[in-house]
Image: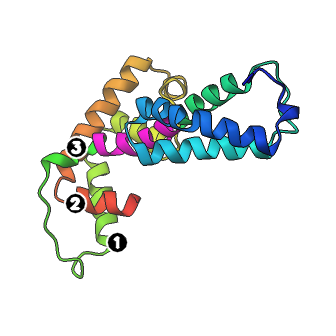
Amino acid sequence: MNFNISYRSLDKQLFEQLFRDYFTRLCNFAQSYINDLDTAREIVQEVYINLWQKKESIDTDKSIKSYLYASVKNRCLNYIRDNKKFRSYVLDVEIADFEVTFESDAFTESELQTKINNALGKLPEKCRQVFQLSRFEELKYKEIAAKLNISVKTVEAQMSKALKILREELKDYIIVVLLMMI
């Protein structure tokens, strides 16, 4: 079957044929990016749904096969990007090295906030400034460097120092912090 046809001629029969011909291949392709078959299937299903819903508005010279593969690749990369944010929090706090025990009744959010504030207070001034601009104001390192009139390398060094100090200061509370973030 020729899949170099225009999107505007995509009817139910052709859509079903595309699904039968490419679904498994696209799932394998997606799985090569994300290593999780269930998530790969969800991504491919979303691509097919999007293709069907936008079949009238998609206007391109690419073949449908190319469109499907490019869409799956882009959605996989988006999935990796979106989930990398969470993983970076985990990496920042290195939770694998901690053993935490606490009584949930005895531990309140205000107590945790006090511990965090105390830990932030132990940071050197420049370190605290850089950390707060990065994590609370969500500025990029380049923006922080410009705002504080320092180099990007200095921002990186200060963030590394801040994270090291905070990991040490909050090591007994790290699981609670992560659970609150989720």
Q: Nearer the viewer, mark 2 or mark 3?
A: 3
Q: Write down the region rendered in magenta.
A: 79-91
Residue at the image point whose x is 69% and y is 47% from the top: 49
Mark pair 2, 3: CA separation: 12 Å
Q: Taking 172 as reference, is 51 above or below it?
A: above
Mark pair 2, 1: CA separation: 13 Å
Residue 82 part of the magenta-drawn span: yes
Is 159 left, or right, of 67 in this rendering? left
> Can you identify the residue that label 3 sits on?
94
- Please identify the quadrant where the N terminus is shown: top right
Of residues 125 and 61, the one nearer the viewer is 61
Q: Specify the principal SS of the magenta part.
A: helix
Residue at the image point whose x is 37% and y is 63% from the top: 180
Is 82 left, or right, of 46 in this rendering? left
Indicate the position of residue 55 as horizontal and vertical percent values. 82, 39
Residue 9 placement: quadrant: top right
Q: Earlier in the sequence, mark 2 or mark 3?
A: 3
Residue 70 placement: quadrant: top right
Q: Is residue 123 at least partly visible in the picture?
A: no
Q: Taking 162 as reference, is 117 above or below it?
A: below
> Can you identify the residue that label 2 sits on?
173
Indicate the position of residue 120 as horizontal and vertical percent values. 31, 49
Outermost residue, bottom direction?
105
Mark 2 element type: loop
Indicate the position of residue 148 as horizontal and vertical percent values. 49, 27
> Can you identify the residue that label 1 sits on?
110
